[in-house]
Image: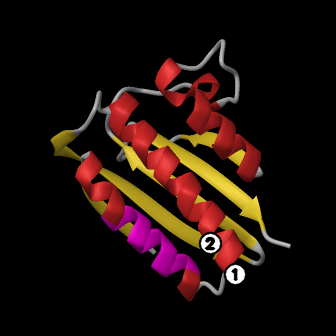
Amino acid sequence: MNFETNATKDKLKEFRKFVSSSLKDLGLSDNHRDDLVFVCGEALLNIIKISYAGGDDSKTMKIDISKDNNKIILKFFDNGTKLVQEDLLNNPLNSSKESNLSNFFINEIMDEVILEETENWINCVMLSKQLS
């Protein structure tokens, strides 16, 4: 399941609604769904604030949601400022001020936070969570 739209803050509500609905369709509990919708909101806000310097109506961002056995995989795509793996770490000394708290929450909730290579996008951030 995926959703792509303009990289602006006013699109965050649509993304969250898509994420919640998709996770419900995948059979996730309310607790897991709430945590993952929160994480997605933080990740998408980071894309808008950092990769697109506050938003860019002429650019897009995309989320892809999948389930592999009991593992949820969330992939975030954008064509903004190129990231390096250190940008995703929960390390205030190596993160931008705007992403510190978001990175903390994302890394606390998710099992993996990885920057992946992709041909069609500048950035692809993969988050995964093993469900119990």
Q: Which amino acid type is shown beneath numbered disc 1? A: Ser
Mark 2 = which residue? 33
- Residue drawn at x 56%, y 77% as measured from the top left: 23
Instruction: Identify the disc placed on residue 122.
Output: none
Quarter in which the C terminus is drawn: bottom right
Of residues 127 and 42, the one nearer the viewer is: 42
Mainly helix, strand or loop, the magenta region? helix
Tell me the quarter of the picture where residue 85 sits: top right
- Residue drawn at x 27%, y 57% as measured from the top left: 11
Task: Say left or right for 11 vs 129.
Answer: left
Q: Residue furthest right?
A: 132
Tell me the quarter of the picture where residue 84 sits: top right
- Residue drawn at x 70%, y 22% as measured from the top left: 91
Task: Say left or right for 68 vs 19.
Answer: right
- Residue drawn at x 63%, y 52% as measured from the top left: 127
Name the colouring of the figure. secondary structure
Q: Which amino acid type is shown beneath numbered disc 2? A: Arg
Of residues 73 and 54, the one nearer the viewer is: 54
Q: Looking at the image, do the residues carrying marks 1 and 2 touch, with CB atoms under 8 Å apart? A: yes
Q: Is residue 77 magenta?
A: no
Label 1: few (<14), some or many (≥20) within 10 Å?
few
- Residue 78, given in percent of the width and then of the height, sits at 36, 43
Q: Residue furthest left?
A: 58
Of residues 69 and 93, the one nearer the viewer is: 93
Mark 1 = which residue? 29
Q: CA distance from mark 1 to mark 2?
A: 6 Å
- SS for dot 1: loop
Tell me if residue 18 comes above or below residue 112 in the rendering. Answer: below
Of residues 23 and 67, the one nearer the viewer is: 23
**For the magenta stretch, what is the residue range?**
14-23
Tell me if residue 122 comes above or below residue 10 in the rendering. Answer: above
Label 2: few (<14), some or many (≥20) within 10 Å?
some
